[in-house]
Image (spheres, rainbow, N blue to C red):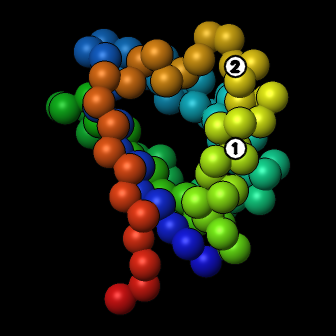
Amino acid sequence: MQFQLREYTIAMGRLDDFVAEWREHLLPLRLSMGFGVLGPWVDRETDRFVWLLGFDGDGRAADAAYYESPERKAFDPDPSRLIAESRVVWLEPA
C-alpha cells in the first residue's frame, strides 16, 4: 500500500467550513475510488488540517485518476478554494 500525508493551511476563519466540505464531498469520493483514509485532524491554533490516505496499488496513478474524475471536477464549490497552502508527501514503509 502507498501512503500520502496531506497537510493544509486553511484560510483564516474557514477551518470548520473546510472540514464540513471535506466530509461531505472529498471523503466519500476518495473512499468510493478505493482509497483508505486515516484522519482527519485539525490544529485550530494554526488553521491546519492534516490527513493520511492510502491506496493498495499505484497510488500516484489513483491520485491522478481522482483529480481527473468527472465527480471531482464537478465539486461546486470546490473545497480547495479554502486551502491557503498545502503540503503533500508520499510516504513509504521504514
Q: Name the front one of labels 1 and 2.
A: 1
**Residue farthest along the bottom direction in this orientation:** 94
Q: Amino acid at mark 2?
A: Phe
Residue 20 appearing in the image: yes
Q: Amino acid at mark 1?
A: Tyr
Separation of marks 1 and 2 at Cα, in angstroms:
12 Å
What residue sits right under mark 2 in the picture? 75
Does residue 45 sit above or below 66 in this rendering?
above
Quarter of the image with the C terminus in it: bottom left
The numbered dot on residue 66 is 1
Residue 42 appearing in the image: no
* Residue at image coords 46%, 16%: 81
* Residue at image coords 51%, 67%: 3
**Mark 1, other Cα within 10 Å: few <14 / some 14–19 / many ≥20:** some
Does residue 14 sit above or below 62 in this rendering?
above
Give the SS element for disc 2.
loop
* Residue at image coords 26%, 15%: 12
